Amino acid sequence: MLTHDLESIPDYARKVEALGYDCLWSAETQHDPFLPLAVAATVTSKIKLGTSIAVAFPRSPMILAQISWDLAKASGGRFILGLGSQVKGHNERRFSVKFESPAPKMREVVLAMRAIWDCWQNGTTLAFKGQFFRFDLMTPFFNPGPIEHPGISVYIAGVNPTMCRVAGEVCDGLHVHPFNSPKYLRELVRPAVEEGMAKAGRARADFTYATSSFVIVGDTEQEIARHKQAVKQQIAFYASTRTYEPVLAAHGWQDLVPHLHRKSVEGDWKGMADLITDEMLETYAVVGSYATIAARLKERYAGLLDRTAFYQPDKQPTLDDPRLPRVIQEFNGSR
């Protein structure tokens, strides 16, 4: 979602739906991720609405369950709850919450919400007890009751194999981080998810791999060059964090992490971007014109991902760009 201004959301959401987009995602960065979707739900009828992502651990699973229940009802079942663990520093220092065993705790968050939703929908006794959470009180006064579309899809974000296994075991989809490559997806992400799915006896058809892809798209050399520098900067930002080391390690570039981290501490943002080579850029980003970018994305991710969107760090395309409808039409034609 390119705007969090709640007053402009109605017009924006209608326009996105009319253009033929399949899903409108809202991220938790400077603003709450749920409020824009609540507004969008009331003015749209077909487009899916999802969080990509909402930070899980600062919120009780009960709070997440309640917000999701209301959004599922308001949207007629179009809401997708996307959750992420965030890294330790942000949990402890930005949200002031305990950071512990992120993958097992995320698994419990999902299972706890499903127990709560089952209680509301089917009148089962709420009796969830895990390592991190306990929910065993639900009186009629606080029970919102059943809704028409109770099957809320839950996606989680995962980078490392442990979280990817959790996604395969208990979730409906995985938010693959934009900092990815086909090799990393084939060798790390997909095997881990499939291991989780096998553990739970789940079918591939019941699972969605979603991402936003770094794209360098333009119809002039100047446009391409400007976007390249911005994408290098964003790749360097992610690669400076140890959490994302597996994405680099898949290509033997893990030794770059401490150098990038040191420059980030020094505030040398240009120096960080300069460490990202053209080979790395082509590995983690897709380059093309507006006439070719859809085909190149589909070719790169065929058999690896189910849905994607543009991730352009410097400037998102405006909905009025006359080149966009063709790209959307090409993606829609492949479904």
Image (tube, grey):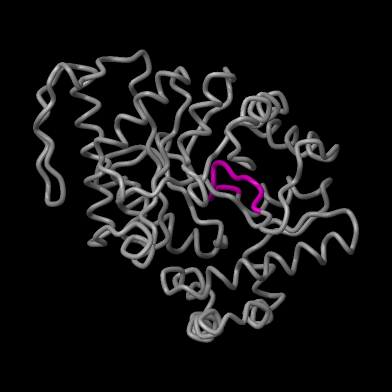
Q: Report the residue that reaches farthest toward the front.
A: 7
Q: How many marks?
A: 0
Which residue is depicted at the point 41% across and 37% down?
A: 81
Residue 307 shown in magenta:
yes
**Quadrant position of the C terminus in the picture:** top right
Q: Position of residue 71 (x, y in %)?
A: 42, 25
* Residue 262, above or below 80: below
Camera-nearest residue between 74 and 192: 74
Considering only vertical position in the picture, is 281 above or below 1? below
Rendered position, 291 above or below 238: above
Q: Which one is in front, 59 or 198?
A: 59
Residue drawn at point x = 50 percent, y = 59 percent: 185
- What is the quadrant of the N terminus in the image? top right
User: Is residue 230 placed above or below 213 in the rendered structure?
Assistant: below
Residue 7's quadrant in the figure? top right
The residue sitting at 46% across, 46% down in the picture is: 53
Q: Nearer the viewer, residue 19 or 145?
A: 145
Q: In this rendering, would 177 be left or right of 11?
A: left
Residue 15: percent from left, percent from top: 71, 27
93 left or right, relative to 266: left
Query: Could you tell me residue 159's position as x and y percent?
Result: 42, 60
Which secondary structure type mostly characterizes the magenta part of the structure? loop
Q: Is residue 125 magenta?
A: no
| Percent coordinates x, y for residue 154 in the rendering | 37, 37
**Image-based side of 248 in relation to 224, left or right:** left
Image side of residue 178 versus residue 12, left or right: left
Residue bounds of the magenta highlight = 302-311
